[in-house]
Structure formats: structure tokens, C-alpha cells
Image: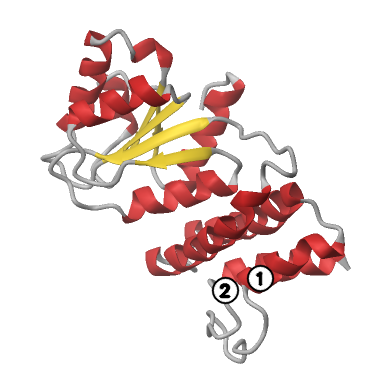
Amino acid sequence: MPEDIISLIQESVIQGRITKDDEGMDEGMIGQPGVTELVERAPASGLSIQNIITKGLSGGMNIVGQKFEAGEYFIPDMLASAEAVSAAMKILQPRFAASNIKTKGTIIVATVKDDLHDIGKNIVSILLRGAGYTVKDLGNNIDTQVIVDAVREEKPQFLGLSALLTSTMARMADVIQMLEENGLRDQVKIIVGGAPVSEEFAKSIGADGYGADGFQAIAVVEDLASGTES
């Protein structure tokens, strides 16, 4: 039954299980299909790619988000689930064109210059792909000029900037300023995030939104995409 496969995909995401050989959060899971095996067989059961993503993968990550907010899951748990979604999306991505699925928009993400941390950015990237966005991840320690050049060339709807150090937060303001100087600021919505970043800081540098964690970042992007304020 399609509904059963959706439930199993959700559970594999929640458990952070990529293949049948993975243990997961609970005992006794080894040998049961992981998210990649389930996603491979799902289309044959009549499930659309869109339902696999929105109901299965995103549905599972929504539950992971609730567990994270409730203190039941921690960063390693959330990262394991995000990696499971990423593995599933690699399988599904080539089938997008054949299914005539249009992406919701394109977002460039980067950790700013002199900051080597990227776990949060990676989680946001995976969640965005699972939500139906095209993501171009520039990586970490990215020079301001490189980010601005990418915005000019790719023409994304969104730009996500991450920083985990108070000493690198100012780089976000540098990016926004350079976008303004190059006449590109009005062409892209900018979302910032990271441990030392706050909503007040985001407003002070002229960003369009702030995400305290991966799930809030997704909500902000969705709000901006729909033209509502977060």
C-alpha cells in the first residue's frame, strides 16, 4: 500500500536510516529497508515523486523538528536524519524532469569568509532540497566577492548566509553591502543564521529573514516565497 511506504519512509528518516544495514535510533532495525531502498521501490507502488518528498521525506523531517524542539533529539540525531533525506534526494533528483516537477525556487547557501563551520548550513541545504527548492551550496569560508559573483551569475531567488563565530558575523553585512554596490541587492532575498546570529542582528544588517535553526530557516524561506512576513 502506498500509505504504508510513506509511513516507512517517514520512520526511516526519523531513525536516520539510509540503508537496511543501518541501526537507527531504536534497536532491532537492522535488516529492515532504509530510506534509499524504500524510495527506490516507492514509484512502482504508484506514489508520485512529489508525495514521496512532501509526505515521506519532509513529513519525517517535520517530526524530527518537533523532537528537536522538545529536547528529545540533538544535533547529531538531526544530522543523521538530514543525511538520510539527502541520500533519498540524490536518488529522486534525476526523476524530477521526467515527472515535470518544478522547483519552488533557487537558493544559494554559503558559510561566510573565515568561518569553517558548516553543519547547520548542510542541514538547511538538505531540508530545502527536501522541500522542493534547488540549492547551490558554495561551501564554507567563502569570500564575499565569490558569493556576490554567484548571485550575479545564478540569479537565485534566495541567498542563505551562515556564521558560527561572532568574529565572522560582520562578513554577512559585507556581503549585503557589496550586493548593494553591485546593484544586486533588490534581486535576492537574504536569510541569515548561525549560533551567534539573532533576529535583531539580521535586521540591523538589512537581511530579509533570520532562522534560529534549520526548520525555522525553511519556514522563513517559505514565508518569503509566498510574500508573507515571517
Q: Position of residue 159 (x, y in %)?
A: 38, 29
Q: Position of residue 207 (x, y in %)?
A: 34, 23
Give above or below for 2 relative to 101: below
- Dot 2 and dot 1 residues touching (CB under 8 Å): yes
Instruction: Give the residue displayed 19% in from the left and 26% down from the top.
Output: 145
Instruction: Give the residue displayed 72% in from the left and 55% down from the top.
Output: 52
Q: Position of residue 93 (x, y in %)?
A: 60, 50
Mark 2 to mark 1: distance in Å? 6 Å
Left or right of 42 on screen, residue 63: left
Farthest bottom residue in view: 28
Q: Which mark is residue 11?
A: 1
Instruction: Give the residue displayed 72% in from the left and 71% down from the top.
Output: 8
**Residue 141 sits in quarter:** top left
Give above or below for 202 relative to 177: below
Left or right of 9 on screen, residue 185: left
Q: Position of residue 47 (x, y in %)?
A: 82, 56
Which type of secondary structure does the marked residue at label 2 adopt? helix
User: Which residue is under mark 2?
Assistant: 15
